Image (cartoon, rainbow, N blue to C red):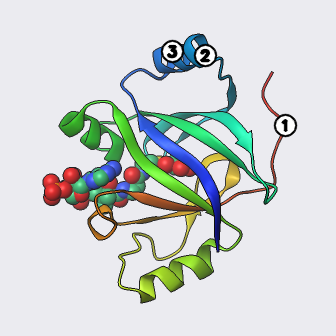
Amino acid sequence: MLTRIDHIGIACFDLDKTVEFYRATYGFEVFHSEVNEEQGVREAMLKINDTSDGGASYLQLLEPTREDSTVAKWLAKNGEGVHHIAFGTADVDGDAAEIKDKGVRVLYEEPRRGSMGSRITFLHPKDCHGVLTELVTSAPVESPEH
Ligand code: MC0
């Protein structure tokens, strides 16, 4: 069961500048940052709020680390902006299987590693009314940086 918006993924050309925009404009601080080589992104997670299921909702700022990454390809075509939405679930495997049975393409055979040790998969945007959709099962929440 999908229980929250886990994050909204925002593609940007310059992660540091974009982080600074969100800090200076809204006061959002970086909760976590990492490089995900498999996905070809450097990312910053800005925690917006905790949620009633014990999880949280984030903005995820994404800068490509290589030209052949999906985010680089998307930026070249669309410029900066909202890249995907991610729903949180306690059971990414079960929910992905159920959604697949409804005829939606699930992009990974098995969930892969996502931000902060989470397990993630994606649904094809063409089957989701133009929205690249991610399913996330979080790892237990860590303490913020700094
Ligand atoms: C592509 N399309 C999108 C889209 N990306 N539509 C909405 N939102 C997006 N983000 C559309 C294109 O415009 C195109 O439509 C069609 O889908 C095929 O796209 P393509 O440019 O030809 O590219 P493909 O087919 O090679 O790849 C698209 C696909 C790929 C969605 C399969 O981007 C993918 O596997 N994405 C999942 C992984 C990902 O995005 N990782 C980065 C975030 P037209 O009409 O022109 O045919 S990593 C992340 O978020 C992790 C770290 C985390 O959360 O923890």
Residue 58: % across, % down: 62, 41
Residue 146 position by quadrant: top right
Q: Residues within 10 Å of mark 3 (few under 14, many from 20)?
A: few
Q: Is residue 59 visible?
A: yes
Query: Which mark's residue is nearer the viewer, 1 or 2?
Result: 2
Q: From the image, tell me which residue sits under label 1.
A: 143
- In the displayed structure, 117 sits above or below 33; it is below
Amino acid tagged 1: Ser
- Number of marks: 3
Going from N to C along the chain, the mark reached first, 3 or 1, is 3
User: With 16 as the anchor, is 80 left or right in this view?
Assistant: left
Percent position of residue 130, x then y: 28, 58
Dots 2, 3 in contact, CB < 8 A: yes
Asked whether 9 or 38 is in front, the reply is 9
The amino acid sitting under disc 3 is Phe
Q: Nearer the viewer, mark 3 or mark 1?
A: 3
Q: Is residue 59 left or right of residue 70?
A: right
98, above or below 136, in the image: below
Q: Determine the residue positioned at 27% across, 35% down.
A: 75
Residue at x 52%, y 77% (from the top left corner): 96
Which residue is under mark 2?
23
The local crowd at label 1, few if under 14, some if 14 to 19, many if 20 or more residues have their Cα within 10 Å, is: few
Query: Dot 3 corresponds to which residue?
Result: 21
Q: Residue at x 35, y 84 (%)?
A: 103
Local SS, label 2? helix
User: Would residue 51 be found to the left or right of residue 13 on screen?
Assistant: right
Amino acid type indicated by mark 2: Arg
